[in-house]
Image: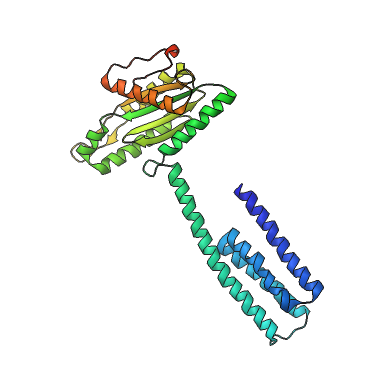
Amino acid sequence: MGSRIRLHRVLFIALATVFVALLIELSGEFHLLWPFYCVPIFVAALTFHAPGAILMTATVGAIVGFNVLDANVSVTDAGVAEAAVGVGAFFISAMIVGVLTQRQELRSMELERISVFDPLTGLYSSTYFTTRLEEEIRRRSRYGGEITLLLIELEDFKEFKETFGTRRGDLLLEHMAEVMKIAVRNTDVLAYRHEGTFGLICPHCPQSDAATVARRLSELVEKTEFEGDELEPVTMHTVRIGASTCPDSALDAEELLALAESGLRASESGHATPASPAEGSQAGEA
């Protein structure tokens, strides 16, 4: 969409430049019509920022110079001096507009990136995770298939932070995110939700495969050595996993999340038992 808009603006810039040049050529009113060149200059600045302002101003300057030479007007003519000053003023203004527009776009892109990705782990954010889950459920209702939702909780994460400090806790989460990326498919959606809890959406993953996915994740984490501190350089960790599947467990995102959360709590208390599809829920333990 963005590239298409830019193409339209490029065409508009070219057409506007040609239109003003032809209008001046046919009417012979150079001194009256040259200010209309400000239109392509500012559109170029808005679209391509400072480089666009520089390129378009250079183009307009060349066209204006050609018009002056073609009309055999003296460079000391007041109208020529006015045009030169005017083009210079357009250039300075367009540069300011281009720089400000670029800063605004970069700020918007950063805000969008933050809303999509978690700044600590680099995984998808919790908000984006919920949005994608709703999108996947709508896609499943249209095209069929099954979706498995896993909530993966790092055991004793709060105690780890209290023992090793917040900085080590953050490093653990970063390392955990890298480890989990290895175990998921390209089509899966892996996100960091909160306080040592990750979320995983597995499209086209039936209920029968949920236990396999959970086991693969938990075994990978258990075999991985994580950084501790000077007194305990290496730490080992385990995870609890709660699972739910659409449509076997539920048909909407809120209920799927609630069922997976119930699976985590049941796993924490040590008596998780998967419910049958007929009962409309599944609670997994890893």
Residue visible at 69% across and 82% down?
A: 80
Q: Position of residue 231 (x, y in %)?
A: 18, 38
Q: Quadrant of residue 210?
A: top left
Left/right placement of residue 61 relative to residue 183 reads: right
Which residue is at the far bottom?
Answer: 76
Residue 124 visible, this angle: no
Left/right placement of residue 145 relative to residue 151 reads: right
- The quadrant the C terminus occupies is top left
Q: Is residue 177 above or below residue 66?
A: above
Which residue is at the far left?
Answer: 231
Q: Is residue 164 above or below residue 36?
A: above
Residue 220 visible, this angle: yes
Residue visible at 25% across and 42% down?
A: 166
| Front residue (pair 67, 79) | 79
Q: Position of residue 157 (x, y in %)?
A: 27, 33
| Front residue (pair 275, 148) | 275
Q: Is residue 198 above or below residue 245?
A: below
Q: Quadrant of residue 182?
A: top left
Colour mapping: rainbow
Left/right placement of residue 256 relative to residue 286 reads: right
Q: Position of residue 256 (x, y in %)?
A: 43, 25
Which residue is at the far right?
Answer: 26
Q: Quadrant of residue 266?
A: top left
Q: Position of residue 192 (x, y in %)?
A: 38, 36
Disc count in the image?
Answer: 0
| Front residue (pair 271, 160) | 271
| Front residue (pair 175, 15) | 15
